[in-house]
Image (cartoon, rainbow, N blue to C red):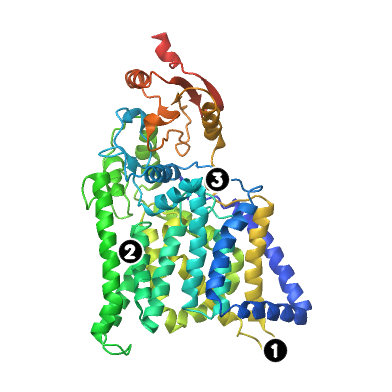
């Protein structure tokens, strides 16, 4: 089976080798020094247990640990440089919000400025839901969009910890929060790019954490948090958020209608739970309608739907047919939409297998580590736990939804992050009670699993190994170097980007901010003589430069037309 876009499993193979060595060392130490290991473990649990009465303090410490630890790693992992189409689209949204607007007017030279995952009509704006853009805009107003990423990841860790408190004993909830911090907030691409992930994860945690509390003791606060979780999911990962929240919403409605099981009358339950939720969701619906209308001209037409209609011909779902190819204004869009996207899935079982394999590797890389497999014996008992049936259903529905769409990355299924952590921690709890005669083999497996996560993260930091998605953490700095070089020169500039025949469609340089005409440096595509002449005339007050990313990504010279035009 030859896949057009095979996953890079090299890093996973490498970490498997180190994991096997580390597991052997940890097993040997715990067996050889069983009493010492038990004393150390008891001391750690005593420390964790000491803070059980201080959940607010624990949540605050987890939140602060994220930006503090990541900033401390800046010498090894610098501030991430955007390099993926999606990142630039989110950064456009951030810049738009930071300018106090929901969208921008279309530019008269839009054909030369056309960029991926961005709508130019009826308004110039990102196609994505607004949650990630809002977070980046907060960071931009504080000095850098990446600050918004740090804050959102801190909020995610605190939210997952708060959710776990409703399902697990406090010390185990704290351990779960630390697992999220280690896995997602140091070397993961979630914190080392502008793609997002934290917003959806936080929304999912608020929803399921509030649900557990409502079912136990209804309160207006938890009803508001449940609705807030729904609102975040709707504005970060609408499709996956819908699949994630549907079982929870149906279960909550069943609880509201099932009589006096909660000790409250039906009208009391509606007053405490339903009315606050309705208020938040109605406000959210109105806000979304206003946002859609500003960007697309229709309250019910989402920007992403408009972008799909305008540019995409490949199916969004495996069961959808492909549309006829479209004609685009530039060669890069032609290669991406009529080439790459249509080749990725050709409606054959072979391509389905390729996509399943690609997604499985990506999901495992993002949400798991090899040492997590040691918790599988405990997961068997977690699967039979009646209290966890709803989380299992929610996870299964999100997983199924991820595999029936053509395109899916790990942060797409971020709403289910809290459930993955919940099931893992619960599996560890069951493991600690399993033994054979006097040998507590389950405890050894549980300890080793957590220690391997710590070792895995520490090894990645030492090796400066950001993520198996290496291109999400190491954006091409060449474009940034050119940008800074031109910003240091007097006057204003226009950069004409000339691509080669072997151009990598994932490495595009043509992206601009919210207010294009006021930018010191404007990036544009070289298309043809007619469009280029109009563009140069429009920006005649700017110095025109030429870059050739595919031939020499450091090349920068005064603009000259292509040789074939000069010969004519």
Would you identify the image quadrant in which residue 47 lies?
Answer: bottom right
Q: CA distance from mark 2 to mark 1?
A: 47 Å
| Drawn side of residue 62 relative to residue 386, left or right | right
Q: Residue furthest top?
A: 568
- Position in image of residue 342 (x %, y %): 36, 43
Q: Earlier in the sequence, mark 3 or mark 1?
A: 3
Q: Which residue is mark 2?
A: 242
- Position in image of residue 322 (x %, y %): 29, 46
Question: In the picture shown, does residue 158 fall above or below 463?
Answer: below
Q: Nearer the viewer, mark 3 or mark 1?
A: 3
Question: In the picture shown, does residue 248 fall above or below 87?
Answer: below
Which mark identifies residue 80?
3
Q: Which residue is mark 1?
A: 438
| Drawn side of residue 175 relative to residue 279, left or right | right
Q: Nearer the viewer, mark 2 or mark 1?
A: 2
Q: Residues within 10 Å of mark 3 (few under 14, many from 20)?
A: some
Would you identify the image quadrant in which residue 91 lies?
Answer: top left
- Position in image of residue 535 (x %, y %): 35, 22
Q: Residues within 10 Å of mark 2 (few under 14, many from 20)?
A: some
Q: Earlier in the sequence, mark 2 or mark 1?
A: 2
Question: In the picture shown, does residue 550 fall above or below 173?
Answer: above
Q: Nearer the viewer, mark 2 or mark 3?
A: 3
- Position in image of residue 165 (x %, y %): 49, 77
Which mark identifies residue 18?
none
Question: In the picture shown, does residue 163 fall above or below 483?
Answer: below
Helix, strand or loop at mark 2 = helix
């Amino acid at each position: 089976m030859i896949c057009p876009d095979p996953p890079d499993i090299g890093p996973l193979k490498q970490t498997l080798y180190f994991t096997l060595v580390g597991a052997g060392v940890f097993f040997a130490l715990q067996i050889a020094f069983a009493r010492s290991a038990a004393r150390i473990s008891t001391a750690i649990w005593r420390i964790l247990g000491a803070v059980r009465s201080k959940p607010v303090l624990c949540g605050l410490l987890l939140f602060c640990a994220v930006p503090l630890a990541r900033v401390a790693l800046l010498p090894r992992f610098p501030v991430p440089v955007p390099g993926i189409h999606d990142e630039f689209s989110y950064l456009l949204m951030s810049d738009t919000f930071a300018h106090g607007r929901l969208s921008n007017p279309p530019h008269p030279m839009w054909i030369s400025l056309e960029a991926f995952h961005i709508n130019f009509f009826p308004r110039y704006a990102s196609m994505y839901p607004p949650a990630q853009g809002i977070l980046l805009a907060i960071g931009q107003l504080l000095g850098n969009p990446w600050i918004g990423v740090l804050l959102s990841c801190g909020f995610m860790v605190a939210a997952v910890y708060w959710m776990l408190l409703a399902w697990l004993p406090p010390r185990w909830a704290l351990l779960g929060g630390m697992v999220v911090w280690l896995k997602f907030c140091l070397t993961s691409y979630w914190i080392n790019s502008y793609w997002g992930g934290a917003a959806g994860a936080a929304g999912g945690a608020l929803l399921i954490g509030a649900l557990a509390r409502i079912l136990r003791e209804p309160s207006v606060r938890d009803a508001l948090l449940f609705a807030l979780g729904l609102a975040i999911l709707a504005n970060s990962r609408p499709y996956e958020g819908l699949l994630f929240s549907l079982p929870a919403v149906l279960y909550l409605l069943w609880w509201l209608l099932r009589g006096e099981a909660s000790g409250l009358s039906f009208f009391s339950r509606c007053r405490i739970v339903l009315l606050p939720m309705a208020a938040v969701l109605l406000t959210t619906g109105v806000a979304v309608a206003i946002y859609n209308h500003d960007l697309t001209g229709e309250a019910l037409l989402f920007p992403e739907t408009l972008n799909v209609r305008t540019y995409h011909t490949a199916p969004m779902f495996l069961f959808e047919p492909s549309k006829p190819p479209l004609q685009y204004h530039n060669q890069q869009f032609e290669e991406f939409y009529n080439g790459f996207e249509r080749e990725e899935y050709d409606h054959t079982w072979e391509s389905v297998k390729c996509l399943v394999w690609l997604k499985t590797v990506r999901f495992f890389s993002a949400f798991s580590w090899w040492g997590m497999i040691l918790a599988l014996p405990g997961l068997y008992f977690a699967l039979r736990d009646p209290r966890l049936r709803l989380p299992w259903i929610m996870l299964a529905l999100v997983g199924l939804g991820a595999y029936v769409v053509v395109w899916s990355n790990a942060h797409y299924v971020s709403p289910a992050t809290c459930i993955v952590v919940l099931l893992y921690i619960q599996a560890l709890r069951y493991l600690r009670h399993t033994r054979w005669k006097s040998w507590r083999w389950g405890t050894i497996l549980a300890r080793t699993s957590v220690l391997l996560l710590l070792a895995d993260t520490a090894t990645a930091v030492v090796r400066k190994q950001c993520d198996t998605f290496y291109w999400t953490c190491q954006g091409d700095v060449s474009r940034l170097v050119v940008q800074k070089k031109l910003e240091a020169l007097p006057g204003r500039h226009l950069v004409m980007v000339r691509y080669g025949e072997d151009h990598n469609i994932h490495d595009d340089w043509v992206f601009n901010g919210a207010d294009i005409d006021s930018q010191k440096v404007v990036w544009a595509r070289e298309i043809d003589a007619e469009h280029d002449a109009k563009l140069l005339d429009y920006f005649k007050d700017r110095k025109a430069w030429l870059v050739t990313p595919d031939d020499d990504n450091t090349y920068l010279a005064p603009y000259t037309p292509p040789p074939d035009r000069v010969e004519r």
